[in-house]
Image (spheres, grey):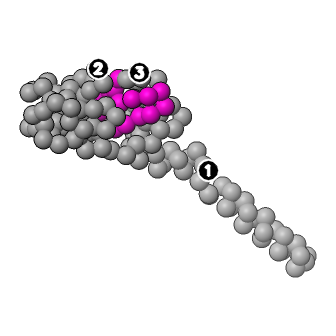
Amino acid sequence: MLTRRALVTRGAVAGAASVFFLWPRPAEAEAETAKPVLARTKDIRVGGGKIVKGKYVITRPKKNVFRCFSAKCTHQGCTVASVSGGTINCPCHGSKYDIRTGAVVRGPAPRALPRKKIKVSGGRIRLA
Ligand code: FES
């Protein structure tokens, strides 16, 4: 025969076990919510950058500073093609943007590249 105490104890143990097994573990929860990796930090040299999927440009102005901008030139919409000499460069009409801010360094682009928020963690760069 079960005593009231035994029933309460078994109920508590069963409840705790079900919470343990059903609750997402931190790594699983992160994997479910994490956005795709755009790039790895080791693949972007200091002072350089990388065009990702023709949609984003990720730059690294300093060792621990990463920036992300739209890769669509604000002049006529070409995709920027390279990052060199401290600028993000559009091949169509020669516009150049600052790798730190996305600001126009040389036209004809009328305005800065829109900045995208990113999250850098564990050597991986993702959109925030
Ligand atoms: S589209 Fe980039 S400079 Fe014209």
Indicate which label's residue lies in the foreground, 2 or 3. Answer: 2
Specify the label residue 34 is tagged with: none
The part of the image, by quadrant, that contains residue 77 is: top left
* Image coordinates for residue 47, horizontal then vertical, percent: 37, 23
**How far apart are the alpha carbons under marks 1 and 2?**
45 Å
Amino acid type at circle 3 is: Arg
At a point 60% along the width and 49% down the height, the residue shown is: 26
User: CB of residue at label 1: within 8 Å of ligand 1?
Assistant: no
- Is 34 drawn above or below residue 89 in the view shown? below
Part of the protein shown in magenta: 48-68
For mark 2, what is the residue?
85
SS for callout 2: loop
For mark 1, what is the residue?
25
74 part of magenta stretch: no
At a point 8% along the width and 27% down the height, the residue shown is: 93
The part of the image, by quadrant, that contains residue 57 is: top left
- Is 33 drawn above or below residue 77 in the view shown? below
SS for callout 3: loop
Main SS type for the magenta part?
strand
Mark 1 Cα shell of 10 Å, populated few (<14), some (14-19), many (≥20) = few
Specify the label residue 45 is tagged with: 3
**How far apart are the alpha carbons under marks 1 and 3?**
34 Å
At a point 44% along the width and 34% down the height, the residue shown is: 65
Indicate which label's residue lies in the foreground, 1 or 3. Answer: 3
Amino acid type at circle 2 is: Gly
